């Protein structure tokens, strides 16, 4: 999952009321962050959204 797809997924969850605006802001920051000093892979980003924020693709 690239940053654009992850961002769209976050926006979709926010617009449907499944997450709060605070959670959306935190998730947006997290998908652009580093993991252990390296850029996140697509699978890292997908897993982080699901486990940390409860945001999953349907």
Image (cartoon, grey):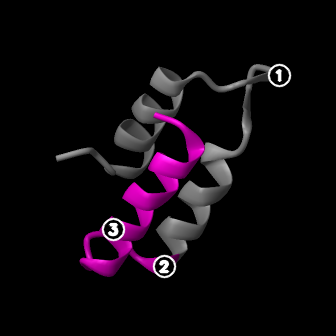
Sequence order check, earlier mark of 2 and 3: 3
Taking the image as shown, residue 9 lies to the left or right of residue 34, namely left
**Quick one: 36 or 11, which is closer to the camera?**
11
Which residues are drawn in magenta? 1-21
Q: Where does the image place residue 47, in percent across and percent down from the top left?
A: 41, 30
At horizontal 26% and vertical 70% (from top left) the residue drawn is 18
Q: Where does the image place residue 11, in percent across and percent down from the top left?
A: 42, 69
Residue 19, quarter of the rendered image: bottom left
Q: Which residue is mark 1?
A: 37
What separation in Å lies between label 2 and label 1 (alpha carbons)? 27 Å
Q: Which residue is mark 3?
A: 12
Q: Is residue 10 above or below residue 30?
A: below
Q: Which residue is mark 2?
A: 21
Q: Where does the image place residue 56, in percent across and percent down from the top left?
A: 28, 45
- Asked if the residues shown at circle 2 and circle 3 are in contact, with their CB atoms under 8 angstroms apart, the answer is no
**Quick one: 29 or 52, which is closer to the camera?**
29
Q: Secondary structure at mark 1?
A: loop
**Quick one: 20 or 2, which is closer to the camera?**
2
Q: Is residue 39 above or below residue 28?
A: above
What's the mark number on residue 28?
none
């Amino acid at each position: 999952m690239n940053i654009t797809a992850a961002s769209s997924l976050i926006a979709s969850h926010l617009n449907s009321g499944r997450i709060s605006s605070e959670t959306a802001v935190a998730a947006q920051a997290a998908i652009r962050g580093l993991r252990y000093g390296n850029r996140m892979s697509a699978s890292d980003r997908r897993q982080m959204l699901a486990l940390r924020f409860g945001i999953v693709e349907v």
